[in-house]
Image (spheres, rainbow, N blue to C red):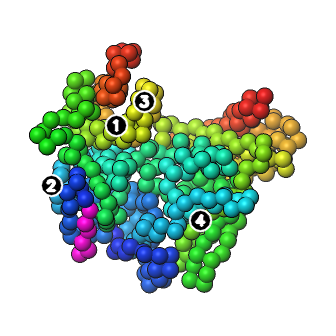
Amino acid sequence: MKASAGGYARAESVRHALDLLAGSDGQGRVLAGGQSLVAAMNMRLSVGDLLVDISKISELSGIAVEGDTLRIGALTRHAQVGTDPQVQAHAPLLKDAVAHIAHAAIRNRGTIGGALAHADPAAEFPACTLALGATMHAEGPDGSRSIAVEDFFEEVFTTALNEDEILTGITLPIAEAGEMQILEEVARRSGDYALVGLCLAKRAAGHRVALFSVGPKPVLAMGAMAALDAGDLDAAVDALSAEIDPPSDTQASAAYRRHLGGVLLRRAVARLKGDAA
Amino acid sequence: MPQVAMTVNGKPARGEVEGRTLLSSFLRDNLGLTGTHVGCDTSQCGACVVHVDGKDVKACTMFALEAEGAQVDTIEGQAGADGSLNVIQQAFQDHHGLQCGFCTPGMVMTAAALLKETPKPSEAEIRDYLEGNICRCTGYHNIVKAILAASGQDAGAIAAE
Protein backbone atom coordinates (compact mmCIF):
# COMPACT_ATOMS: atom_id res chain seq x y z
CA MET A 1 0.00 0.00 0.00
CA LYS A 2 1.07 3.59 -0.50
CA ALA A 3 0.90 6.52 1.86
CA SER A 4 -2.06 8.83 2.07
CA ALA A 5 -1.20 12.42 2.96
CA GLY A 6 -3.33 15.54 3.33
CA GLY A 7 -0.57 17.67 1.88
CA TYR A 8 3.09 18.51 2.00
CA ALA A 9 4.91 21.71 2.84
CA ARG A 10 8.61 22.31 3.15
CA ALA A 11 9.49 24.56 6.07
CA GLU A 12 12.29 27.06 5.43
CA SER A 13 12.81 27.93 9.09
CA VAL A 14 11.57 26.99 12.54
CA ARG A 15 9.23 30.00 12.48
CA HIS A 16 7.87 28.92 9.10
CA ALA A 17 7.35 25.39 10.39
CA LEU A 18 5.47 26.68 13.43
CA ASP A 19 3.25 28.82 11.17
CA LEU A 20 2.51 25.82 8.98
CA LEU A 21 1.58 23.74 12.01
CA ALA A 22 -0.57 26.55 13.40
CA GLY A 23 -2.42 26.81 10.09
CA SER A 24 -2.98 23.07 9.71
CA ASP A 25 -6.16 22.83 11.78
CA GLY A 26 -4.66 20.11 13.95
CA GLN A 27 -3.73 17.94 10.93
CA GLY A 28 -0.09 19.00 10.85
CA ARG A 29 2.54 16.32 11.24
CA VAL A 30 6.21 17.11 11.50
CA LEU A 31 8.31 15.16 8.98
CA ALA A 32 11.95 14.93 10.06
CA GLY A 33 13.84 11.83 8.88
CA GLY A 34 10.56 10.02 8.29
CA GLN A 35 11.89 6.55 9.10
CA SER A 36 8.96 5.72 11.36
CA LEU A 37 6.40 8.12 9.95
CA VAL A 38 6.69 7.18 6.27
CA ALA A 39 6.56 3.46 7.03
CA ALA A 40 3.49 4.06 9.23
CA MET A 41 1.89 6.07 6.42
CA ASN A 42 2.65 3.32 3.90
CA MET A 43 0.85 0.91 6.21
CA ARG A 44 -1.99 3.44 6.47
CA LEU A 45 -1.57 3.55 10.22
CA SER A 46 -1.47 7.30 9.79
CA VAL A 47 -3.72 8.92 7.18
CA GLY A 48 -4.46 12.44 5.98
CA ASP A 49 -1.67 14.27 7.74
CA LEU A 50 -0.46 17.60 6.42
CA LEU A 51 3.25 16.94 6.33
CA VAL A 52 5.46 19.76 7.51
CA ASP A 53 8.91 18.81 6.25
CA ILE A 54 11.50 20.33 8.58
CA SER A 55 14.43 18.34 7.18
CA LYS A 56 15.91 21.29 5.28
CA ILE A 57 16.21 23.52 8.39
CA SER A 58 19.97 23.34 8.74
CA GLU A 59 20.11 25.15 12.11
CA LEU A 60 18.41 22.16 13.73
CA SER A 61 21.27 19.81 12.88
CA GLY A 62 24.61 19.47 14.57
CA ILE A 63 26.50 18.52 17.71
CA ALA A 64 28.34 20.94 20.00
CA VAL A 65 29.87 21.02 23.46
CA GLU A 66 28.80 24.10 25.42
CA GLY A 67 30.59 24.20 28.76
CA ASP A 68 29.61 21.05 30.61
CA THR A 69 26.70 20.17 28.33
CA LEU A 70 26.49 18.40 25.00
CA ARG A 71 23.91 19.87 22.64
CA ILE A 72 22.51 17.73 19.83
CA GLY A 73 20.24 19.32 17.25
CA ALA A 74 16.96 17.54 16.63
CA LEU A 75 17.73 16.86 12.98
CA THR A 76 21.08 15.22 13.65
CA ARG A 77 20.88 11.87 11.93
CA HIS A 78 21.47 8.60 13.73
CA ALA A 79 24.52 7.84 11.57
CA GLN A 80 26.07 11.14 12.63
CA VAL A 81 25.36 10.51 16.31
CA GLY A 82 26.99 7.12 15.91
CA THR A 83 30.24 8.42 14.44
CA ASP A 84 30.67 11.83 16.09
CA PRO A 85 33.81 12.04 18.27
CA GLN A 86 32.14 14.42 20.73
CA VAL A 87 29.29 11.97 21.29
CA GLN A 88 31.85 9.20 21.70
CA ALA A 89 33.72 11.23 24.32
CA HIS A 90 30.83 12.79 26.21
CA ALA A 91 27.77 10.52 25.76
CA PRO A 92 29.04 7.11 24.61
CA LEU A 93 25.68 5.56 25.48
CA LEU A 94 24.16 7.28 22.44
CA LYS A 95 26.90 5.97 20.18
CA ASP A 96 26.30 2.43 21.44
CA ALA A 97 22.56 2.86 20.95
CA VAL A 98 22.99 3.74 17.28
CA ALA A 99 24.43 0.31 16.51
CA HIS A 100 21.13 -1.20 17.70
CA ILE A 101 18.86 1.12 15.71
CA ALA A 102 17.51 -0.53 12.56
CA HIS A 103 19.90 -0.69 9.57
CA ALA A 104 22.53 1.55 8.04
CA ALA A 105 20.18 2.89 5.36
CA ILE A 106 17.64 3.86 8.01
CA ARG A 107 20.28 5.39 10.25
CA ASN A 108 21.28 7.61 7.32
CA ARG A 109 17.82 9.22 7.34
CA GLY A 110 16.42 8.89 10.86
CA THR A 111 16.99 11.78 13.27
CA ILE A 112 17.45 11.83 17.02
CA GLY A 113 14.77 14.47 17.46
CA GLY A 114 12.36 12.47 15.35
CA ALA A 115 12.99 9.35 17.41
CA LEU A 116 12.45 11.24 20.68
CA ALA A 117 9.31 13.04 19.52
CA HIS A 118 7.93 9.77 18.10
CA ALA A 119 8.43 8.20 21.56
CA ASP A 120 8.27 4.59 20.52
CA PRO A 121 8.45 2.67 23.81
CA ALA A 122 10.74 0.07 22.21
CA ALA A 123 13.22 2.62 20.84
CA GLU A 124 16.69 3.15 22.31
CA PHE A 125 17.13 6.93 22.31
CA PRO A 126 14.24 7.79 24.67
CA ALA A 127 15.63 5.49 27.38
CA CYS A 128 19.17 6.75 26.76
CA THR A 129 18.11 10.34 27.32
CA LEU A 130 16.27 9.28 30.48
CA ALA A 131 19.34 7.47 31.81
CA LEU A 132 21.55 10.46 31.05
CA GLY A 133 19.16 13.07 32.45
CA ALA A 134 18.73 15.04 29.22
CA THR A 135 16.78 18.24 28.75
CA MET A 136 14.51 18.60 25.74
CA HIS A 137 14.24 21.95 23.99
CA ALA A 138 11.05 22.86 22.17
CA GLU A 139 9.93 25.85 20.16
CA GLY A 140 6.30 26.90 19.94
CA PRO A 141 4.19 29.90 18.96
CA ASP A 142 4.88 31.50 22.33
CA GLY A 143 8.63 30.96 22.25
CA SER A 144 10.94 28.27 23.47
CA ARG A 145 10.83 26.10 26.57
CA SER A 146 12.85 23.34 28.15
CA ILE A 147 11.37 20.07 29.34
CA ALA A 148 13.15 17.73 31.74
CA VAL A 149 13.34 14.23 30.28
CA GLU A 150 11.49 12.83 33.30
CA ASP A 151 8.47 14.93 32.25
CA PHE A 152 8.84 14.43 28.50
CA PHE A 153 7.68 10.88 27.78
CA GLU A 154 4.04 10.39 28.73
CA GLU A 155 2.53 7.41 26.91
CA VAL A 156 2.98 5.24 23.83
CA PHE A 157 3.91 7.67 21.01
CA THR A 158 2.99 10.57 23.30
CA THR A 159 5.23 13.27 24.74
CA ALA A 160 4.81 16.55 26.59
CA LEU A 161 5.20 18.40 23.28
CA ASN A 162 2.10 20.32 22.28
CA GLU A 163 0.74 19.86 18.76
CA ASP A 164 1.93 23.33 17.81
CA GLU A 165 5.47 22.78 19.13
CA ILE A 166 8.62 21.38 17.54
CA LEU A 167 11.46 19.65 19.33
CA THR A 168 14.56 21.62 18.33
CA GLY A 169 17.28 19.79 20.23
CA ILE A 170 18.46 18.17 23.41
CA THR A 171 21.18 18.92 25.93
CA LEU A 172 22.94 16.36 28.09
CA PRO A 173 25.43 16.69 30.92
CA ILE A 174 28.79 15.60 29.51
CA ALA A 175 30.16 12.43 31.02
CA GLU A 176 32.25 12.87 34.17
CA ALA A 177 35.82 11.61 34.30
CA GLY A 178 35.47 7.90 34.99
CA GLU A 179 31.74 7.78 34.23
CA MET A 180 30.63 4.55 32.59
CA GLN A 181 27.66 4.15 30.26
CA ILE A 182 26.44 0.78 29.08
CA LEU A 183 23.58 -0.33 26.84
CA GLU A 184 22.29 -3.90 26.73
CA GLU A 185 19.34 -5.21 24.75
CA VAL A 186 17.78 -8.38 23.49
CA ALA A 187 16.07 -8.38 20.09
CA ARG A 188 14.84 -11.26 17.99
CA ARG A 189 16.64 -10.07 14.87
CA SER A 190 19.57 -7.74 14.29
CA GLY A 191 18.16 -4.24 13.85
CA ASP A 192 14.71 -5.15 15.10
CA TYR A 193 13.01 -3.50 18.05
CA ALA A 194 14.23 -4.61 21.45
CA LEU A 195 12.21 -7.14 23.42
CA VAL A 196 13.78 -5.41 26.41
CA GLY A 197 16.62 -2.93 26.63
CA LEU A 198 18.54 -1.39 29.51
CA CYS A 199 20.78 1.66 29.86
CA LEU A 200 23.14 1.94 32.81
CA ALA A 201 25.20 4.98 33.75
CA LYS A 202 27.57 4.99 36.73
CA ARG A 203 28.45 8.42 38.01
CA ALA A 204 30.13 9.68 41.18
CA ALA A 205 26.67 10.52 42.55
CA GLY A 206 25.32 7.03 41.86
CA HIS A 207 23.85 4.74 39.26
CA ARG A 208 21.17 5.56 36.68
CA VAL A 209 19.17 2.72 35.14
CA ALA A 210 16.57 3.21 32.41
CA LEU A 211 14.70 0.48 30.58
CA PHE A 212 12.86 0.41 27.29
CA SER A 213 10.29 -1.91 25.76
CA VAL A 214 8.92 -2.74 29.22
CA GLY A 215 5.84 -0.51 29.15
CA PRO A 216 4.25 2.49 27.44
CA LYS A 217 7.27 4.71 28.05
CA PRO A 218 10.88 4.37 29.18
CA VAL A 219 11.21 3.65 32.88
CA LEU A 220 13.77 5.00 35.34
CA ALA A 221 14.35 2.08 37.74
CA MET A 222 14.74 4.01 40.99
CA GLY A 223 14.68 0.94 43.24
CA ALA A 224 17.35 -0.82 41.23
CA MET A 225 19.45 2.35 41.20
CA ALA A 226 19.30 2.64 44.99
CA ALA A 227 20.24 -1.03 45.43
CA LEU A 228 23.18 -0.69 43.02
CA ASP A 229 24.34 2.37 44.95
CA ALA A 230 24.26 0.16 48.06
CA GLY A 231 26.33 -2.43 46.20
CA ASP A 232 23.67 -5.17 46.26
CA LEU A 233 23.14 -6.56 42.76
CA ASP A 234 20.68 -9.27 43.82
CA ALA A 235 18.53 -6.66 45.55
CA ALA A 236 18.76 -4.47 42.45
CA VAL A 237 17.47 -7.31 40.25
CA ASP A 238 14.61 -7.93 42.68
CA ALA A 239 13.77 -4.23 42.82
CA LEU A 240 13.85 -3.99 39.03
CA SER A 241 11.53 -6.94 38.70
CA ALA A 242 9.05 -5.26 41.04
CA GLU A 243 9.16 -1.81 39.47
CA ILE A 244 8.55 -2.71 35.83
CA ASP A 245 5.21 -3.86 34.48
CA PRO A 246 5.98 -5.08 30.98
CA PRO A 247 3.31 -6.08 28.46
CA SER A 248 2.69 -9.49 26.93
CA ASP A 249 2.43 -9.52 23.16
CA THR A 250 3.17 -11.77 20.19
CA GLN A 251 6.90 -11.18 20.68
CA ALA A 252 7.29 -12.06 24.35
CA SER A 253 5.33 -12.62 27.53
CA ALA A 254 5.38 -10.18 30.43
CA ALA A 255 7.14 -12.76 32.59
CA TYR A 256 9.86 -13.28 29.99
CA ARG A 257 10.39 -9.53 29.63
CA ARG A 258 10.59 -9.13 33.41
CA HIS A 259 13.15 -11.93 33.53
CA LEU A 260 15.15 -10.32 30.70
CA GLY A 261 15.25 -7.04 32.62
CA GLY A 262 17.15 -8.77 35.42
CA VAL A 263 19.42 -10.61 33.00
CA LEU A 264 20.32 -7.37 31.23
CA LEU A 265 21.00 -5.62 34.54
CA ARG A 266 23.40 -8.40 35.55
CA ARG A 267 25.12 -8.25 32.13
CA ALA A 268 25.48 -4.49 32.33
CA VAL A 269 26.92 -4.61 35.85
CA ALA A 270 29.33 -7.35 34.78
CA ARG A 271 30.56 -5.12 31.96
CA LEU A 272 30.86 -2.26 34.42
CA LYS A 273 33.14 -4.33 36.62
CA GLY A 274 35.05 -5.92 33.75
CA ASP A 275 35.76 -2.62 32.10
CA ALA A 276 36.74 -1.00 35.39
CA ALA A 277 39.22 -3.73 36.29
CA MET B 1 0.67 19.26 -8.08
CA PRO B 2 4.08 20.24 -6.76
CA GLN B 3 7.15 20.00 -8.97
CA VAL B 4 10.25 18.20 -7.85
CA ALA B 5 13.70 18.41 -9.39
CA MET B 6 16.74 16.31 -8.59
CA THR B 7 19.75 14.78 -10.31
CA VAL B 8 19.39 11.07 -11.00
CA ASN B 9 22.45 9.14 -12.14
CA GLY B 10 24.09 12.40 -13.12
CA LYS B 11 21.23 13.69 -15.24
CA PRO B 12 18.65 16.30 -14.27
CA ALA B 13 15.22 14.84 -13.57
CA ARG B 14 12.00 16.61 -12.75
CA GLY B 15 8.34 15.82 -12.51
CA GLU B 16 4.99 16.52 -10.93
CA VAL B 17 4.33 14.53 -7.79
CA GLU B 18 1.91 14.42 -4.94
CA GLY B 19 3.08 15.11 -1.42
CA ARG B 20 2.71 11.43 -0.66
CA THR B 21 4.66 10.20 -3.70
CA LEU B 22 7.53 8.05 -2.52
CA LEU B 23 10.98 8.42 -4.03
CA SER B 24 10.71 4.78 -5.13
CA SER B 25 7.46 5.57 -6.98
CA PHE B 26 8.95 8.67 -8.59
CA LEU B 27 11.95 6.70 -9.85
CA ARG B 28 9.85 3.82 -11.15
CA ASP B 29 6.67 5.49 -12.37
CA ASN B 30 7.77 8.97 -13.42
CA LEU B 31 11.27 8.21 -14.64
CA GLY B 32 10.77 4.58 -15.72
CA LEU B 33 13.78 3.47 -13.68
CA THR B 34 12.28 0.18 -12.62
CA GLY B 35 15.59 -1.27 -11.48
CA THR B 36 14.79 0.06 -8.01
CA HIS B 37 12.58 -2.73 -6.71
CA VAL B 38 9.88 -2.42 -4.07
CA GLY B 39 9.40 -5.47 -1.90
CA CYS B 40 7.74 -4.28 1.27
CA ASP B 41 7.19 -0.50 1.27
CA THR B 42 7.92 -0.55 4.99
CA SER B 43 11.72 -0.29 5.21
CA GLN B 44 12.31 -3.93 5.94
CA CYS B 45 13.51 -5.66 2.77
CA GLY B 46 16.06 -3.26 1.31
CA ALA B 47 15.25 -4.01 -2.36
CA CYS B 48 14.70 -0.27 -2.94
CA VAL B 49 18.03 1.00 -1.61
CA VAL B 50 19.41 3.94 -3.61
CA HIS B 51 21.97 6.56 -2.74
CA VAL B 52 20.85 10.09 -1.90
CA ASP B 53 23.72 12.58 -1.71
CA GLY B 54 26.09 9.64 -1.45
CA LYS B 55 24.32 7.85 1.41
CA ASP B 56 22.36 4.61 1.10
CA VAL B 57 18.68 5.08 1.92
CA LYS B 58 15.47 3.15 1.42
CA ALA B 59 13.64 4.85 -1.43
CA CYS B 60 10.30 3.54 -0.16
CA THR B 61 10.69 5.43 3.10
CA MET B 62 11.35 8.85 1.70
CA PHE B 63 9.03 11.15 -0.20
CA ALA B 64 10.14 12.34 -3.63
CA LEU B 65 9.80 15.94 -2.44
CA GLU B 66 12.34 15.28 0.29
CA ALA B 67 14.88 14.61 -2.46
CA GLU B 68 14.46 18.07 -3.96
CA GLY B 69 17.88 19.18 -5.21
CA ALA B 70 19.55 15.92 -4.21
CA GLN B 71 21.97 13.73 -6.13
CA VAL B 72 20.27 10.35 -6.46
CA ASP B 73 22.07 7.26 -7.71
CA THR B 74 20.23 4.08 -8.65
CA ILE B 75 21.19 0.65 -9.93
CA GLU B 76 20.77 1.94 -13.51
CA GLY B 77 23.73 4.25 -12.99
CA GLN B 78 26.11 1.53 -11.84
CA ALA B 79 27.12 -0.03 -15.15
CA GLY B 80 29.31 1.82 -17.64
CA ALA B 81 27.79 3.70 -20.58
CA ASP B 82 28.60 0.71 -22.81
CA GLY B 83 26.73 -1.64 -20.48
CA SER B 84 29.84 -3.09 -18.89
CA LEU B 85 29.20 -4.18 -15.32
CA ASN B 86 30.93 -2.37 -12.51
CA VAL B 87 33.20 -4.29 -10.16
CA ILE B 88 30.41 -5.11 -7.69
CA GLN B 89 27.97 -6.22 -10.37
CA GLN B 90 30.66 -8.32 -12.02
CA ALA B 91 31.48 -9.95 -8.68
CA PHE B 92 27.81 -10.79 -8.12
CA GLN B 93 27.79 -12.50 -11.52
CA ASP B 94 31.11 -14.29 -10.98
CA HIS B 95 30.14 -15.61 -7.54
CA HIS B 96 26.51 -16.36 -8.28
CA GLY B 97 25.39 -13.71 -5.79
CA LEU B 98 21.85 -13.80 -7.08
CA GLN B 99 19.19 -16.25 -8.10
CA CYS B 100 15.82 -14.59 -8.78
CA GLY B 101 17.42 -11.15 -8.77
CA PHE B 102 14.67 -9.29 -6.96
CA CYS B 103 16.83 -8.16 -4.04
CA THR B 104 19.91 -7.60 -6.20
CA PRO B 105 19.56 -3.87 -6.95
CA GLY B 106 19.34 -3.15 -3.23
CA MET B 107 22.17 -5.54 -2.46
CA VAL B 108 24.46 -3.93 -5.02
CA MET B 109 23.65 -0.40 -3.86
CA THR B 110 24.11 -1.38 -0.22
CA ALA B 111 27.40 -3.09 -1.06
CA ALA B 112 28.54 0.04 -2.89
CA ALA B 113 27.77 2.14 0.20
CA LEU B 114 29.65 -0.28 2.43
CA LEU B 115 32.74 -0.37 0.22
CA LYS B 116 32.82 3.43 0.05
CA GLU B 117 32.84 3.56 3.85
CA THR B 118 34.96 0.45 4.44
CA PRO B 119 37.03 -0.50 1.38
CA LYS B 120 38.19 -3.85 2.83
CA PRO B 121 35.39 -5.10 5.06
CA SER B 122 35.64 -8.35 6.98
CA GLU B 123 33.07 -11.06 6.44
CA ALA B 124 31.43 -10.06 9.73
CA GLU B 125 31.29 -6.41 8.68
CA ILE B 126 29.67 -7.38 5.39
CA ARG B 127 27.04 -9.52 7.08
CA ASP B 128 26.35 -6.76 9.61
CA TYR B 129 25.97 -4.11 6.93
CA LEU B 130 23.53 -6.29 4.97
CA GLU B 131 21.17 -6.60 7.94
CA GLY B 132 18.64 -4.35 6.22
CA ASN B 133 18.61 -6.34 2.96
CA ILE B 134 16.60 -9.52 2.70
CA CYS B 135 17.32 -12.24 0.13
CA ARG B 136 15.05 -15.28 -0.01
CA CYS B 137 17.09 -17.29 -2.52
CA THR B 138 20.79 -17.34 -1.88
CA GLY B 139 21.16 -17.75 1.85
CA TYR B 140 23.44 -14.70 1.58
CA HIS B 141 26.61 -16.75 1.35
CA ASN B 142 27.37 -15.99 -2.28
CA ILE B 143 26.41 -12.36 -1.80
CA VAL B 144 28.99 -12.07 0.97
CA LYS B 145 31.55 -13.79 -1.25
CA ALA B 146 30.77 -11.43 -4.11
CA ILE B 147 31.26 -8.37 -1.90
CA LEU B 148 34.51 -9.76 -0.53
CA ALA B 149 35.69 -10.33 -4.08
CA ALA B 150 34.55 -6.86 -5.18
CA SER B 151 36.72 -5.40 -2.42
CA GLY B 152 39.74 -7.23 -3.81
CA GLN B 153 39.82 -9.87 -1.08
CA ASP B 154 39.93 -13.63 -1.36
CA ALA B 155 36.34 -14.80 -1.50
CA GLY B 156 37.47 -18.41 -1.26
CA ALA B 157 38.75 -17.75 2.25
CA ILE B 158 35.32 -17.84 3.83
CA ALA B 159 34.05 -21.18 4.95
CA ALA B 160 31.42 -23.00 2.94
CA GLU B 161 28.06 -23.16 4.68
Q: Which residue is mark 3?
A: B121
What's the chain of the residue with tag 4? A
What's the chain of the residue with tag 2? B
Q: Quadrant of residue A277?
A: top right
What's the chain of the residue with tag 3? B
Amino acid type at image mark 2: Gly
Q: Is residue B4 magenta?
A: yes
The lab-note entry on whether marks 3 and 2 share a chain reads: yes
Mark 1 or mark 2: whose residue is earlier in sequence: 2
Residue A224 horizontal side relative to residue A61, left or right: right
Rounded to the nearest angstrom, the CA distance separating label 4 from label 1 is 33 Å
Q: Is residue B109 visible?
A: yes
Residue A51 to residue A202: above or below = below
Rounded to the nearest angstrom, the CA distance separating label 3 from label 2 is 34 Å
What is the x, y in percent for residue B85? 18, 35
What is the x, y in percent for residue B8? 23, 55
Q: Which mark is residue A169?
A: 4
Classify mark 4: helix, strand or loop. strand
- Nearest the eye: A123 or B4: B4
Q: Which residue is mark 1?
A: B111
Rounded to the nearest angstrom, the CA distance separating label 3 from label 4 is 34 Å
Mark 3 or mark 2: whose residue is earlier in sequence: 2
